[in-house]
Image (cartoon, grey):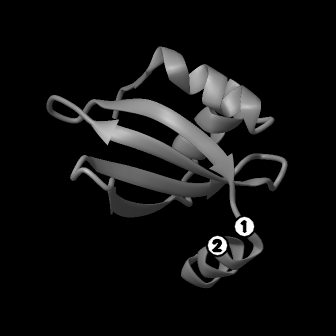
Amino acid sequence: MPYRWLPIAFGICAAAGIEPYEVLQVLTSGRRYVVPAVSDVGIEFRTIWGLTRGGRGLIVVTKPRDGFDSEIVGARPMTEAEREVYDRWT
């Protein structure tokens, strides 16, 4: 699945202390937990939960586009509760 970065995504990630390579590690991991999400105004997203190679839990937000393509919207660290959900899933 090809991913394209929205220009704003770099700023969102940087504000959360997340490096672009960490986002890519989560997106290419074999242990991804995909959770559909919908914004307040009805925009559909996919949240992809996973771990970086260093074990950091991140949630990456993507927007599906044409075919199998998606745009990376941003990312944030998992909360402790989200990490528990992820660990139970995997």
The residue singled out by tag 1 in the image is 79
Relative to 55, 51 lies left or right? left
| 10 Å crowding of disc 2: few (<14), some (14-19), many (20+) | some
* 87 over 48 or under it: above or below: below
* 17 over 26 or under it: above or below: above
* Residue 66 pos. (x, y %): 15, 29
What residue is drawn where x is 55% and y is 80%? 89
**Which residue appears farthest toward the top when viewing the image?**
7
| 10 Å crowding of disc 1: few (<14), some (14-19), many (20+) | few
Asked whether the beta carbons under mark 2 and mark 1 sit within 8 Å of each other, the answer is yes
What residue is drawn where x is 35% and y is 60%? 37
- Which numbered tag is attached to residue 34? none
* Residue 12 pos. (x, y %): 62, 31
Relative to 82, 65 lies left or right? left
The residue singled out by tag 2 in the image is 82
**Which residue appears farthest toward the right when viewing the image?**
54
What amino acid type should be assigned to the residue bearing mark 1? Answer: Thr
* Residue 82 pos. (x, y %): 64, 72
The residue closer to the viewer here, 77 or 29, is 77
What amino acid type should be assigned to the residue bearing mark 2? Answer: Glu
Assign a secondary structure to mark 2: helix
One can see residue 22 in this view = yes
* Residue 27 pos. (x, y %): 53, 42
The quadrant of the image that shows the C terminus is bottom right
Alpha-carbon distance for marks 2 and 1?
5 Å
Relative to 59, 14 lies left or right? right
What residue is drawn where x is 79% and y is 53%? 56
One can see residue 19 in this view = no
Q: Which corner quadrant of the image does residue 50 belong to?
A: bottom right
* 34 over 24 or under it: above or below: below
